[in-house]
Amino acid sequence: RPRVLSGIQPTADSFHLGNFLGALKQWVALQEDFDPFFFIADLHSITMPHDPKLLRERTLVSVAQLLAAGVDPDRATIFVQSQVPAHTQASWVLECLTGFGEARRMTQFKDKSAKGGEGAASVGLFTYPILQAADILLYRPQYVPVGEDQRQHLELTRDLAQRFNKRFKKTFRVPEPYILESTAKIYDLQLPEKQMSKSIGGNGCIWLLDDPKASAKKIRSAVTDSETEIRFDLENKRGVSNLLNIHAALSGAKIDDLVASFEGKGYGDLKAEVAQVVVDFVTPFRNRVHDLLEDRSELETILAAGADRATEVSEATLRDVYERVGFLPRA
Ligand code: ATP
Ligand code: MG
C-alpha cells in the first residue's frame, strides 16, 4: 500500500469543521488504500508563544479527536512529532540546503508574522516549512494529503527533496499533493473570504468540541449576501456556497440535489437545515472524544506504539541522510 503522511497542530482546545472536512475526514478515507502516518505536530505549535500545560493537554485531546473521527490505530501509525527525534535532526540538514530568500517567500510566515512585525516573530516560525519538509521526506511517502493552504509548503518540500537527491544521491522520494477538491476549503462563517482557521476562531469558526447549541447559533448567523436565491457560486455567493458545502460534506448529499431541494426557500431555511446537520454530526463526535479521554493510558499506549514505528522508519532515512552528507558514523 502506498505511504501517505499528514500532520495537524494541537494549537487549540478543539479542532474545527475545516480541520475535520479538510483533513481528518480525508485521513479516515485514506486508511482504506494507503499506509498512513498521521502525527500531532507539537514541534510546530511552539513557533508562536504558548502555554506548556495547555500544549500537553491539547496534544492528547487532539489524539482523541483523530480516533473519534475514525482514524484506526490498527491501520494508521499515529504519533506525536516531538517523540520522534529524527524530525528535528533532518530539519537541520534541510535548513542548510534552503536559501534565505526561498524561505522568506513562504506566505504563511508573512501572514503570521504580520501582527507583531517580523522582528517579533521567532526564527522557528520562519524555518517552520523546512521542518515540515523533514516531517514529510523522512517517511518517503508517495502522497501528502493537504488542504489548498499547504500547497506552497509542499512545493518547497519537493524542491528540497530534488535538491538533496541531485547534490548528494537519490535519498528522498518526491511526494505528490493529494487534494480532495470538493471539500478542500471551508470558509469562515463571518468572513467568507477567509478560510475557517484556529487562529481566527470567533463566531465564524465551528469548534468540534463546543456546545452543539453554540455551533447551531453560529450557523444561523452566518454571513450570506443581499440576494435571496440559493445556488452554488463560490465566486459571487461565497457564504451560501460554503453552507451548501458544509451540508453536502457532512450529510453526503449532492450539491445539485441540495440546491434543487431549496428551490423557493430562503436563506433561513438553508441555515436551519445546515445547523441541524452540524448538530447531528458534532453531538456524537464530542461524546466519543469525552469517552476516549476517560482512559488516558490507552491513548498513551497507542502513541507509544506509533512512536516506535515512526522512529524505525524515520531513523532509517536519517541514517542515509547523515551518511550522504558526510557525517562520520559513531563507531
Ligand atoms: P492555523 O490558523 O493555526 O493555521 P488551521 O485552522 O489553519 O490553524 P492547521 O493546523 O493549519 O489548521 O491545519 C490542519 C489541517 O487542516 C491541514 O491539513 C489544513 O489543510 C486543514 N485545514 C485547516 N483549515 C481548513 C479549512 N478551513 N478548510 C479545509 N481544510 C482546512
Ligand atoms: Mg493553517
Image (cartoon, rainbow, N blue to C red):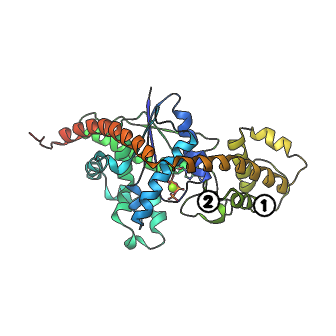
Residue, disc 2:
194
User: Which residue is located at x 33 percent, y 38 percent?
Assistant: 308
Q: Which badge, 1 or 2, is on the more N-terminal residue?
A: 2
Can residue 185 be seen? no
Q: Nearer the viewer, residue 63 or 165?
A: 63
Q: Position of residue 2 (x, y in %)?
A: 44, 28
Mark 1 neighbour density, 10 Å: few (under 14) some (14–19) many (20 or more): few
Q: Identify the image quadrant of the N terminus.
A: top left
Q: Amino acid at mark 1?
A: Asp
Q: How many marks?
A: 2
Q: Position of residue 202 (x, y in %)?
A: 62, 66
Q: Nearer the viewer, residue 316 or 83?
A: 83
Quadrant in the rendering for residue 161: top left
Q: Nearer the viewer, residue 194 or 276?
A: 276
Q: CA distance from mark 1 to mark 2?
A: 16 Å
**In the current view of this chain or complex, which residue is farthest to the right?**
264
Q: Nearer the viewer, residue 277 or 232?
A: 277
Q: Is residue 23 left or right of residue 211?
A: left
User: Which residue is located at x 84 percent, y 58 percent?
Assistant: 227
Q: Position of residue 76 (x, y in %)?
A: 46, 35
Q: Identify the image quadrant of the C terminus.
A: top left
Quadrant in the rendering for residue 179: top right
User: Which residue is located at x 83 percent, y 57 percent?
Assistant: 268
Q: Amino acid at mark 2?
A: Lys
Residue, disc 1:
225
